[in-house]
Image (tube, grey):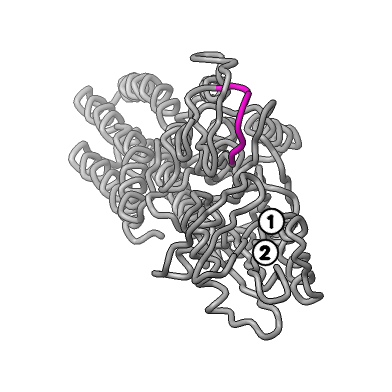
Amino acid sequence: MRPGATVATDGVVIDGRASVDESMLTGESMPVDVGPGSSVTGGTIASGGRLVVRATGVGEETRLARIARLVEDAQLGKSRVQRLADRISGVFVPVVIVLAALTLIAWIVAGQPLAAGFTAAVAVLIIACPCALGLATPIAILVGTGRGAQLGILVTGPAALESAERIDTIVLDKTGTLTAGRMSVTAVTVDEGADAAEALRLIAAVERGSEHPVAYAIVAAAGEGPVASDLDALPGRGIIGHIDGVRVFAGRPALAASLGAPLSPALAAAVADGEQRGTVVVAGWADGGGMRARAVIEVADTVRPESAAAVAELRAMGLEPVLLTGDNEHVARAVAAELGIERVRAGVLPEGKVAEITALRAEGRTVAMVGDGVNDAAALASADLGIAMGGGTDAALHASDVALMRDDPRGIVTAVRLSRRTMRVIRGNLFWAFAYNVAALPLAALGLLNPMIAGAAMAFSSVFVVLNSLRLRRAG
């Protein structure tokens, strides 16, 4: 396998070393170093080295296929939405027919004219026409989902709206949901006497010869610049090259130690601090006294600017946020602390995410899951409500109940708010339709409403339901 190639199927490395991007499966923002004996998964991307892999599973035996089966099983296990209005209408119609017949019989038994009895019975049939009941739910769903589409929120149907209204716990993936999903330089610390801009230029010069995501982040931060010569990539450790006649290295802290390039106290502190939030690159170059570490660059998957506001609003709505990620504990805790999330589960694989969702539901919680990757698909399908971010994979979008077309976590808040308002409108429609029938039926049966007035009242009831539903056009 060449650098940048996609791993074709599950297998075991028998020769070579490289970094493998497993973010689509684990959510881990940093590539994983693999070598002989390491397992690799089909669909992941190798970078920074060549690999010879022996296949261990193909087709239905691969890990991706197992995840797809988890998604399918979870979707089949979901219950169908309870269509309250349809059930009421199904019972209401025969009851009304019986009431109309009884009305006619009562008028005849009371010795009233047959024509008057027929008029009262017809008025009962007209006034009790369940048009408003039949419109109460679908018209509100139609307007609500239409408004959602305008706001970049695609809802699969009434079941999703019902679930969104009932949720009390919202589980959030980290990578690509709360964070940008791509690495970027967040801090540059240089040794005394070194210039940060010059350090970044030299480091970027050697990193331009690497295909590692961290290298891309450093090159993007540095902008245009020269490319180093005599590059020597050391998979899992870093890279060494020459620029302007100077030997430059960049890589993990262990690389600096192996080259005999000591870290000053300031750089050592920067390494210790940076590793709590993401990853660090130690870089240096040779001078008259030999190799020295001169700079520490902190690279991380940065939190989206909108994430903190979204989490705060979700909590204000009575939802408990939970961070669930395949990333390492240090990074997950740092992101959670920045966003004010107390409950964190880190280092969780796709199967483990399903187990975490199942455990939360076993506690009696109604759970929404928000994610964007293949690793989230099974969890999205297992939750009471699955919400996929717009930039997510096809697997995540397929497994979700709600898809956000914009990569903005505030869309989660809007989706929940819109669902709650839509369900309130549906209940209001049902209450009006039912109350109208309960109040008007006795009047019609007593002959106080003639068929013409009954028809006008029935039409007004339907119009009221439609107008009430149209208020959702301003929701969000």
* Percent of width and height locating residue 227: 44, 62
Residue at figure coordinates x 65%, y 46% from the top left:
236
Residue 256: name its quadrant.
bottom right
Q: Which residues are magenta?
A: 10-18
Q: Is residue 213 above or below residue 381?
A: below
Q: Nearer the viewer, residue 324 or 23?
A: 23
Q: Nearer the viewer, residue 274 or 416?
A: 274
* Percent of width and height locating residue 355: 70, 31
Q: Is residue 102 above or below residue 186?
A: above
Residue at figure coordinates x 65%, y 36% from the top left:
34
Q: Is residue 219 magenta?
A: no
Residue under label 1, please give it.
252
* Percent of width and height locating residue 91: 43, 22
Circle 2 SS class = strand
Q: Is residue 430 above or below residue 378?
A: below
Circle 1 SS class = loop
Do labels 1 and 2 touch, CB within 8 Å?
yes
N-terminal of the pair, mark 1 or mark 2, is 1
Q: Nearer the viewer, residue 382 or 272?
A: 272
Q: CA distance from mark 1 to mark 2?
A: 6 Å
The quadrant in which the C terminus is found is: bottom left
Can residue 306 be seen in this snapshot?
A: no
Q: Is residue 161 above or below residue 193?
A: above
* Crowd tier of the residue under label 2, counting other residues whose Cα lies within 10 Å: few below 14, some 14–19, many 20 or above: many
Query: In the image, what residue type sits under mark 2?
Result: Val
